[in-house]
Image: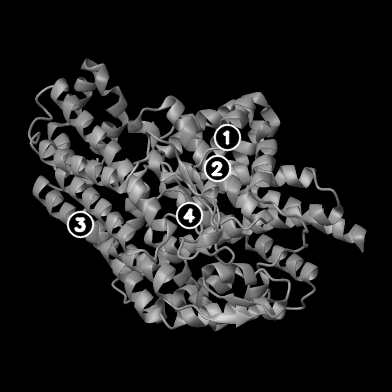
């Protein structure tokens, strides 16, 4: 029960991608914003629902001591808790989305805090359940499940709770920890305000005479400039400003890490990594195989950087040369064009997919364009089971925005397919599965665009984007995972983690991945502050799952291409399974074993094949 709450109380499926300069509020058309009235028609209605949720907590606590009485009593408790969580999720989503529309507004932030307090109190009210369930014992609980079919939706949840017996404390200890649930999330909340609201970002003047505010959005645009001096200026300006906050952000991240290390010890885990993998019953070999295979494949990454240097016409690659497109593309992908192309590409997944996605995209489920104060990046929020998924974008009408559009709608479609077959209790899927449809839809889009390119240059553009996607997801996210693990292991050894020390650890890994010592990509000291820019480091070993998911998505797409309709149905069945079983087992049932090296090697082989094709086209042009 505790674990399900923690998964629900975050915005799953988040992509932190910087975008271009925000629009003024006056330029925002309501048709390009989401309609939160489908959640609650007014703030008053939202507050009433929140109070109704709060009123259920004493009733839940009153059921303490009844789980072992009978199958009916067990069902009554779990049904009550589930229904309360379902309503609480809707309250949380409204507050969270409303806040992200403009992080400068205090009233939405206060409502978001109230929603988080509500969930902290939910944790307190339910803290007794797992210890009592374990005390009742597996034999009795399993007999109740066989006796009462109404417990079927809770069977997996009950099994998972019982599996956690070695790491569940007594009722008093669990209750005490529950009181601190909100404070455990404070570092992430503080970081979010610093990164998105509090830093006074400077303005630069580009070579074209344009003034650009170098916040995360402006940095994201200028770092991809074809003008090398402009992108170096954006890098230097952005990371110099971040460096001013290195001590404070380092303290915030360290407080998060120390908290997680303490919690892992309190629950008798060997490490934070052990806790995070155990939570979803993922074999440790998955994590270690990923890191080992990616490190073996660094020559492939370095090959990409040398190809990039050739295509950009630079003798020595620097870190600020990573983001500009290898070939310019004079095409605009506005929202309607992005919808049309996405649906055309997804035709490979069948008529039912296209029909459902097309209808959903025509609704007001999205907040599309950048604006001042809006949360940067993109995500899908799918916890409002009784409504529909919501998608936050920062669409800039370029191909990167189209690719992100497909990515986030992969999450949304996953949620819709899961709801087709799963009740609320098993509809929420693990992060280990969550990034598979998003990354596979990006791959489907890339292959569609490459196939339909109208010129060699356009084909090179899409192939280059595919390479960059593999770099940023397969290699970069694994690099982040190595860094995150290094921080936790340092803390677990009792080492101090200041902002300077964190930067040193990050810099060593960053330079190794980019071949700095071999002269592949030069990493200036200033750019080793990059770790401060990544909010996922507050999500506890989250990032490695981007890399495993892209790998799994590639393998599943290969099945679709090779097996046709059978491969498509296999893919959809994985999505329909939601969270009805442990994610590693769900994926293994779909034919992909992430504990083995083969899927990762296939991903690397695909990257080399793309570079082979690009080099062939370049040789023809020359």
Q: Disc 3 versus disc 2: distance between alpha carbons?
A: 39 Å
C-beta proximity under 8 Å, tags 4 and 3: no
Return the residue at label 4.
544
Instruction: State left or right for residue 195 relative to residue 401.
Output: left
Q: Residue at x 57, y 38 (%)?
A: 362
C-beta proximity under 8 Å, tags 2 and 1: yes
C-beta proximity under 8 Å, tags 3 and 1: no
Return the residue at label 2.
409
Q: Position of residue 389 (x, y in %)?
A: 45, 40
Residue closer to the observer: 120 or 204: 204
Instruction: State left or right for residue 28 relative to residue 113.
Output: right
Q: Earlier in the sequence, mark 3 or mark 1?
A: 3
Q: Disc 3 versus disc 1: distance between alpha carbons?
A: 45 Å
Q: Earlier in the sequence, mark 1 or mark 4?
A: 1
Return the residue at label 1.
357
Return the residue at label 3.
266
User: Quadrant of the image for the N terminus?
Assistant: top left
Q: Disc 2 versus disc 4: distance between alpha carbons?
A: 21 Å
Instruction: State left or right for residue 585 relative to residue 226.
Output: left
Residue 211 quadrant? bottom right
> Which structural element holds mark 2?
helix
Q: Position of residue 320 (x, y in %)?
A: 64, 74
For disc 2, the neighbor class at 10 Å (few under 14, some 14 to 19, many from 20) is many
Q: Residue at x 39, y 33 (%)?
A: 427
Q: Earlier in the sequence, mark 2 or mark 1?
A: 1
Q: Position of residue 298 (x, y in %)?
A: 63, 63
In this rendering, is residue 616 above or below 72?
Answer: below
Residue 579 quadrant? top left
Q: Residue at x 67, y 79 (%)?
A: 206
**Which dot, 3 or 2, sits closer to the camera?**
2
Q: Disc 4 versus disc 3: distance between alpha carbons?
A: 25 Å
Q: Which mark is residue 395?
A: none
């Amino acid at each position: 029960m505790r674990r399900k709450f923690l998964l629900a109380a975050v915005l799953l499926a988040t992509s932190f991608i910087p975008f271009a300069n925000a629009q003024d509020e006056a330029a925002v058309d309501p048709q390009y914003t989401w309609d939160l009235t489908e959640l609650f028609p007014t703030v008053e209605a939202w507050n009433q629902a929140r109070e109704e949720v709060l009123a259920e907590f004493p009733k839940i606590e009153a059921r303490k001591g009844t789980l072992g009485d009978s199958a009916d009593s067990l069902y009554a408790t779990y049904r009550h808790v589930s229904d309360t969580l379902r309503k609480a999720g809707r309250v949380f989503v409204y507050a969270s989305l409303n806040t992200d529309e403009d992080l400068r507004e205090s009233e939405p932030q206060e409502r978001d805090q109230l929603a988080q307090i509500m969930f902290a109190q939910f944790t307190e009210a339910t803290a007794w359940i797992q210890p009592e369930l374990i005390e009742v014992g597996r034999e009795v609980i399993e007999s109740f499940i066989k006796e009462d079919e109404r417990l079927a939706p809770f069977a997996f949840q009950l099994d998972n709770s019982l599996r956690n017996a070695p790491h569940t404390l007594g009722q008093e200890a669990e209750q005490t920890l529950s009181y601190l649930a909100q404070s455990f999330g404070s570092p992430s909340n503080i970081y979010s305000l610093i990164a998105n609201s509090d830093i006074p970002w400077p303005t630069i003047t580009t070579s074209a005479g344009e003034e650009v505010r170098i916040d995360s959005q402006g940095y994201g645009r200028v770092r991809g400039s074809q003008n090398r001096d402009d992108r170096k200026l954006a890098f230097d300006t952005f990371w110099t400003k971040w460096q001013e906050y290195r001590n404070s952000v380092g303290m915030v991240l360290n407080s998060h890490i120390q908290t997680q290390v303490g919690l892992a010890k309190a629950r008798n885990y060997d490490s934070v990594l052990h806790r995070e993998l155990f939570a979803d019953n993922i074999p440790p070999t998955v994590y270690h195989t990923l890191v080992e295979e990616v490190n073996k494949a660094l020559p492939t990454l370095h090959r990409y950087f040398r190809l990039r240097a050739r295509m950009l016409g630079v003798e020595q690659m620097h870190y600020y040369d990573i983001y500009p497109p290898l070939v310019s593309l004079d095409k605009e992908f506005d929202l309607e064009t992005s919808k049309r192309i996405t649906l055309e590409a997804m035709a490979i997944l069948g008529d039912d997919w296209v029909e459902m996605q097309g209808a959903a995209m025509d609704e007001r489920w999205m907040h599309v364009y950048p604006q001042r104060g809006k949360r940067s990046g993109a995500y899908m929020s799918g916890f409002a089971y009784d409504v529909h998924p919501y998608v936050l974008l920062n669409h800039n009408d370029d191909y990167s925005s189209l690719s992100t559009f497909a990515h986030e709608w992969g999450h949304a479609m996953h949620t819709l397919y899961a709801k087709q077959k799963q009740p609320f209790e098993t509809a929420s899927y693990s992060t280990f599965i969550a990034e598979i449809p998003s990354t596979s839809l990006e791959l489907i889009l890339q292959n569609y665009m490459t196939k339909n390119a109208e010129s060699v240059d356009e084909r090179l553009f899409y192939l280059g984007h595919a390479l960059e996607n593999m770099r940023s997801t397969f290699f970069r996210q694994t690099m982040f995972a190595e860094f995150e693990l290094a921080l936790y292991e340092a803390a677990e050894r009792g080492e101090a983690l200041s902002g300077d020390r964190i930067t040193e650890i990050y810099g060593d890994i960053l330079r190794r991945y980019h071949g700095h010592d071999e002269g592949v990509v030069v990493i200036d000291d200033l750019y080793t502050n990059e770790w401060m820019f990544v909010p996922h480091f507050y999500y506890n070993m989250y990032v490695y799952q981007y890399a495993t998911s892209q790998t799994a998505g590639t393998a599943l797409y290969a099945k679709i291409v090779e097996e046709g309709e059978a491969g498509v149905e296999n893919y959809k069945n994985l999505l329909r399974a939601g969270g009805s079983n442990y994610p590693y087992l769900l994926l293994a049932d779909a034919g992909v074993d992430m504990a083995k090296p083969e899927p990762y090697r296939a991903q690397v082989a695909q990257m080399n094949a793309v570079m082979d094709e690009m080099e062939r086209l370049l040789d023809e042009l020359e």
